[in-house]
Image (tube, helix red, strand yellow):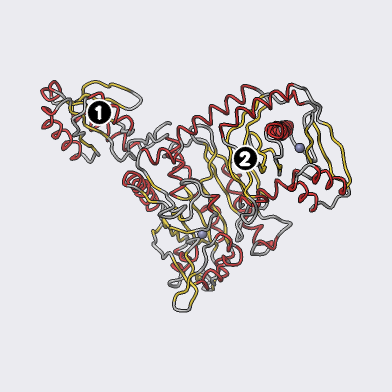
Amino acid sequence: MSSQADELDLEHEQFQPRQLSPVETLRHSTAHLMASAIDQLFPGTKFAIGPHIDNGFYYDMELATPLTEADLPRIEEKMREIAKGNHKFEQFSLSREDAKKWADDNGQPYKAELIDGFTTPTVSFYKHGAFTDMCAGPHVNYSSKLKHFKLTTIAGAYWRGDEKNAMLTRVYGLAFESKEELEAHLKLLEEAARRDHRRLGKELELFSITQEFGGGLVLWLPNGAFIRKQIEDFWREEHLKRGYEILFTPHVAPLSLWDRSGHTGFYKDSMFAPMDVEGQAHQVKPMNCPFHIGCFKNRQRSYRELPVRFAELGTVYRFERSGALHGLMRVRGFTQDDAHIFCTRDQLESEINGCIDFAQVMYSTFGFPEYKVELSVRDSKNKGKYLGTDEQWETAESALVNVLNARGVTFKRMEGEAAFYGPKIDVKVVDAIGRVWQLTTVQVDFNLPERFDLHYIGADNAHHAPYMVHRALLGSIERFFGILIEHYAGDFPLWLAPVQAKILPISEKFLDYAKEVEAALKAKGLRAKLDLSDEKLGYKIRKAELEKVPYALVVGGKEAETQTVGVRKRHQGDLGAMSIDDLAARMLTEVAERSRGV
Ligand SMILES: [Zn+2]
Ligand SMILES: [Zn+2]
């Protein structure tokens, strides 16, 4: 869903009779409290909307002088002062005309515009202390209930989410029912900031995204590119083991292909504008599916060769508004770890089951023991948004449900979250600090095979349409890398680390032996790097630590004499002297095991 639609929903919600949970009520009431404080400190502020959100609230407003984060403590202090006044939140209603007059008299043009959109004869207001706000409620009874809050950030937001409108100031805050919950959340935010993949991406030289080279377009720097290569090598190896065949397909296709697949009809908002190629419109690909269909269609297929499993690390391009872009997590060009399985109706459930098995191998390899499953079905009240018949949707849905039930997996049913061509299973993993990330999707599709006139020759010698399963295990490699950086806090396990060991000679005198160590480790296939700087040992150790190199190997006179190295392991400290062979054996075992607890 676009951010614009989110905002319109919130705006709609705040002025309709609604049910809020106690904590949502508390959060929304804190938005009113903040508005009252800002109204006192910055008279003349024009308020727009102030809904509750996860963990807190925000309020959008227009101020005569721009607000900065340095103003937040002062606003917070004023909020506490007003809260302590123990004002009652009082509801009253005005006719539409009187409400409009209220907005005009109080210099509140955004409220006036909202009133113009209302169809009800009366408009609801809430007042606490000297502050009145137009609102359907509900609120806490008294302002003294609002205790555990903190203002966090200021951002820009277009009125009604439309960039043609005025840019308003959005102030975000947190609010919880207890001090402990607020403190725990602040700690989580601090930990998340320490792990922020954008900061670590810069510090560890993993990737770069700049306006100069295009918003949402990723440059993979050598360190990040190396980790990606490791992930991709592993991914390919595992696919070949499981009977997949690897494909490469183009990045552009005639627009007519996307008409046929239904993408121009159902997916247009996420696609870049077409380009002209000798008078024929071409489209940069938002998905890989039609190409894999093309590979299946390349020749006649027999039931004997089904299932056919095609996999590709396929780079796609999707239009995202610049405001929605976020580091590696939301980009405009990304590589899906995509696959399409063509099978018979009878094979459908075992193929879906195989995808879930495969996904679990990925989670355990990358250290995500916990995950959550969702079943996304179509919005039964809005069938026009989807292709296919009721019977097709029911068949596909029952195949997905049967697999989940047979595995004993508990799942959440998500109405209206299906793809336009079929229902799907989505799996989200839980990271090292408890955040949830969507990775895997397994989708059943009966539409594209029909649209592209796919068939195989059955045992009866007749033509049959195959079922198609779309699946991605990691989602997009870019986003998955962003998640991994934060999950590991940049401390990549040994099999992924671009440099596995740094050799630190105590002084220049031991350079020859240090080079011997480097050559010996490299000969075993390990990634060793010699620190040639003439800095002191302490500095070299600290630098290796900042670079998050898993092993630091100290080399001096004693080590040269005994043909050993002084081993320091990240997070474990000094492991003492080891022979080069022992160290190499230890590292190779660690590489082979791949996974690591975080
Ligand atoms: Zn309210
Ligand atoms: Zn697909």
Viewer-nearest residue: 95 or 46: 46
Residue identifier under label 1: 540
Task: Return the x and y of residue 102 as percentages of the image width and height.
Answer: 83, 43
Q: Specify the amino acid type for callout 1.
A: Lys
Look at mark 2 in the image and give the residue it sits on.
65
**Relative image position of residue 413 (x, y in whole percent):** 66, 46
- Residue pictured at 29% horizontal, 34% vertical: 589
Instruction: Name above or below for residue 63 compared with residue 268.
Output: above
Residue 367, numbered circle: none
Note whether residue 411 is visible.
yes
Q: Position of residue 545 (x, y in %)?
A: 32, 29
Q: CA distance from mark 1 to mark 2?
A: 49 Å
Circle 2 sits in a helix, a strand or a loop, which is it?
loop
Residue 295 location, x and y as percent? 43, 67
Q: Residue at x 74, y 31 (%)?
A: 22
Q: Residue at x 38, y 41 (%)?
A: 202
Question: Closest to the observer: 183 or 464?
Answer: 183
**Disc 1 to disc 2: CB gap under 8 Å:** no
Check disc 2 and give the amino acid type.
Thr
Of helix, strand and loop, which one carries label 1? Answer: helix
